[in-house]
Image (tube, helix red, strand yellow):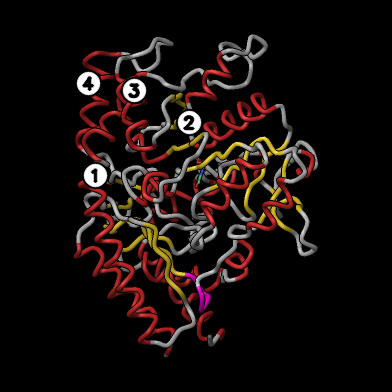
Amino acid sequence: MDRARLRHLLARESGEAERRNPRSKAAYERADHLFGRVPMTWMNKTAGAFPRYLATARGARVTDIDGHEYVDFCLGDTGAMAGHSPAPVAEAVRRRFTESGGATAMLPTEDAEWVGAELTRRFRLPRWSFSLTATDANRWAIRLARAVTGRPKILVNSYCYHGSVDESLIVVGPDGRGTARPGNVGAPCDVTLTSRVAEFNDLSQLEEQLAHGDVAAVLMEPALTNIGIVLPEPGYPAGVRELTRRYGTLLLIDETHTFSAGPGGCTAAWALEPDMLTIGKAIGGGVPAGAYGLSGELAERLLGRDDLDLVDMGGVGGTLAGNALSVAAMRATLEHVLTDEAFAHMVKLSERFEAGVRAGITAHGLPWSVSRLGARTEYRFARRAPRTGTESAAASDAELEDFLHLYLANRGILLTPFHNMALMCPDTTEQDVDAHTGVFADALSDLAG
Ligand code: PMP
């Protein structure tokens, strides 16, 4: 990689973004009352000096306030995997909010049992409860796991992401031991008091940690998706299940992103047998929603415990969780939008996206790799697809990533800001995918000089 050339191109694309997006730039400069000038600080994770401001979004298309249209492969980092404002969700939300009336009344609606039954059909766990975010689903599932096992610790994979969950902000340090993830903001205590960590795809490290006998649950994604995509090697998922059973540890699978693998996520696609499962983002079709599922045996054991306050302030609930609006949106999304047929279409497009990226990489002889998980594809700056989170973290290249994101955005294509990830939704078309393939090839040619 010619770094001088890369820097020159990055400066050129930054200049182009300022020229193309004066309104977004001005809106950002005016936002004095927002912490970090944005409604959420990670909106500052954008290639270039300011974020583009959203004007409209429908299906796989987004427009900004400067009047530019984008093919959106970011899709709200999975929150909009059903496409932006899909018609059945818009209709269900309108009906619930205006026609029937009532978004949040602390009373159940009949939609909730429909959603529970559908989640059972898809993910094979028989009892469900709702949250508004995947983070909260994970927090509550962790508490339940500790309560039911009487064990204090949670084990996660190095460089995982499960939301702003204190117990998960741990990595394997250079000395092979667990240590706080760099940058962790205001940790309540030393993370090694609450957590253990093992590299993804490393069963011997996992066994070594579980053998301490203090791990309530292994919280994991079936494939890592937040440090690039790291796919499991053959035998790894079955090995995790076998070891967790052997050491009396619950297996808690987070399908929030790996839902891209199919209608029942990796759990259905790979016949995983979790004790608990969490999911968020996409299942609400853009409306805040999350859920956790429990095995029948766990649900019974928990409900049978008089000492646990599952009803009031015991730490496993939220006032708006399971509200009528959120549940109506989940039902519409699962019943009419993220259907089995929709996934077939999305996966086919993702294969096309992967082939396009691979062709570009091969044409330029670049030492990069591509990984795909159903409707989600990601390219990584490593010759061999990384097999652990630490390997994948080592392959990141912020400058190169910023250049690609800016180059694509300036030409009407959005990727997920945190990495080179592209997601398909039911409205994505072959033309959209080919548009990325073309611009990606041009970016590589520009880089080559
Ligand atoms: N789990 C996984 C696997 C995620 O990728 C994320 C967010 N990227 C979360 C949980 C947390 O989701 P949220 O921020 O919507 O709570």
Q: Amino acid at mark 3?
A: Leu
- Counting residues from the start of the chain, the first of labels 1 and 4 encountered is 4
Q: CA distance from mark 1 to mark 3?
A: 24 Å
Label 4 vs label 2, nearer the camera: 2
Q: Which residue is mark 3?
A: 325
Residue identifier under label 4: 95
Task: Give amino acid for label 4.
Answer: Arg
Whether ligand 1 has any atom under 8 Å from the Cβ at mark 1 is answered as no
Q: Residue at x 51, y 63 (%)?
A: 233
Question: Nearer the observer, disc 2 or disc 3?
Answer: 2
The tag earlier along the polypeptide, 3 or 4, is 4
Q: Are marks 1 and 4 in contact (CB under 8 Å)?
A: no
Q: Which residue is mark 1?
A: 340
Choose the circle earlier in sequence order: 1 or 2: 2
Amino acid beneath label 2: Tyr
Of helix, strand and loop, which mostly describes the magenta segment?
loop
Magenta stretch contains residue 161? no
Q: Amino acid at mark 1?
A: Asp
Q: Is residue 383 magenta?
A: yes
Label 1 crowd bin: few (<14), some (14–19), many (20+), radius 10 Å: some
Report crowding for label 2: few under 14, some 14 to 19, many 20 or more residues within 10 A (C-alpha): many
Quadrant for the C terminus in the image: bottom left
Give the image location of residue 369, x and y in percent. 45, 74
In this image, 101 relative to 369: left or right?
Answer: left
Q: Is residue 222 visible?
A: yes
